[in-house]
Image: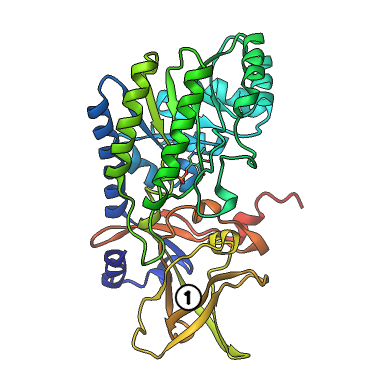
Amino acid sequence: MEKTVEKIRKNNENLLEKYGSPLYIYDYDILEEMCKQMAGFKNNIENRIGNIKINMHYSTKANSNPAILKIVKDTGLCVDCMSPFELSINKKCGFKNDQILYVCNNIDKNEMNMVYDSNVLICLDSISQVETWGMIHPNTEIMVRINPGTNGVGHNKKVITSGKITKFGITESNLPELFETANRYHLKIIGVHQHLGSLFLDDKITDYIDGVKESLRIIKKYFNNIRIIDLGGGFGVPYYEYENKLDLSKIENELVNVLSKFIYDYPSVEEFKFEPGRFIPCESGILMGTVTAIKYENHVWWIGTDIGMNQLVRPSMYDSYHKVSLLNNTDSEEIIANICGNICESGDIIAKNRKINLPSVGDTILIHNAGAYGYSMASNYTGRLRPAEIMIYDKNEKLIRKRETIEYLESNIVW
Ligand SMILES: Cc1ncc(COP(=O)(O)O)c(C=O)c1O
């Protein structure tokens, strides 16, 4: 990330003047590096297990900008998608049908028809959804999502997707009903999916592997002739300065061990899939904005910026930590401050009690690790415009999405 800040500093043009403030910036080199790491992880497992395909489906929801998807594609990774828009973008970026997996939750018949017409494999996550699909597309192949029932993984309870309280997946005790429903519509269940939650680091690898083992136990006990097993995403990146990068080689060793034993007893499996999202774009992204106000009230410093919760919702939604720094003005007195946005909500706070150099109004402020679940979760709340996105290279940058305009926001209104 420091290298990205250097690139921003070296950039002779004032990026905020050129593209508007705030602005999402992605570092091409980091994106490519993270894709290569995932490709390496895939190749290593493939080589060590032998005769089984391993596919990494980048989870488009983390960041769906085509410039990022193209790097994903060029590195030989596949994609998963969860909405008609993501599917459309995936196809436009040149992913072939068999490189796309549609992993959905509570969708209606129209969306199911759209997936069917697109000829991509669907993963359904409840018996009710299997029933709806079966009624309109009998005699087809599907994947189903199970809930292994283990603790799951995740940086916040809102993103843990395994265990007793989650809206996702089919639990072991309901599998007889799943098979009865699938049989009624002559559906062939060719794959089983699990996703335990989002963001685990080294200290939670055991929880991830426990979930994998439990899913494999369930598959072996109940499912016949499964060809595809999808072990989901969740691969984390460090947000706090004291956190370390995820040790992919450790996960690789654990997985090779567990998966090798499994395929020995369950020979029909041809492919394991994974769905890394955050891991790929997160560390490449910086959200750059402007300090718009500074005040000291009731013994508390407040730094106001134009980066509202609509631009980056993670801190207010999940209490997530993002490193915050100033681009310049780093010699001023250090203060402890709440750094907040320009939305009229008390929860519109990017960082609480944060040590930072006292900025001046007009200074440029940087929110680090904003490449994943940043723009893709951004909204127009209070009619604020979503920012532009640029890709930054060693010596230049490229606009990859224009800043919205008021005319654009108004264009769908029927007056
Ligand atoms: C089904 C599914 N797969 C993959 C992902 C990607 O997760 P992550 O970004 O934590 O890797 C998600 C995100 O929560 C998801 O819901």
Q: Residues within 10 Å of mark 1 (few under 14, many from 20)?
A: many
Q: Can residue 401 be seen in this view?
A: yes
**Label 1: element kind:** strand
Percent x, y for residue 415?
Answer: 77, 53
The residue drawn where x is 44% and y is 80% is: 355
Towards the viewer: 244 or 115: 244
The residue drawn where x is 36% and y is 73% is: 14
Q: In this view, does 168 lie to the left or right of 118?
A: right
In the image, farthest residue toward the right: 415
Occupied quadrant, residue 90: top left
Specify the quadrant that holds the N terminus.
bottom left
Q: Please, what is the three-letter code of the amino acid marked with disc 1?
A: Thr
Percent x, y for residue 37?
Answer: 27, 44
The residue drawn where x is 64% and y is 28% is: 126
Is residue 235 depicted above or below 219 in this figure?
below
Percent x, y for residue 342?
Answer: 60, 73
Percent x, y for residue 36?
Answer: 26, 43
Towards the viewer: 264 or 100: 264
The residue that mark 1 highlights is 290
Occupied quadrant, residue 107: top right
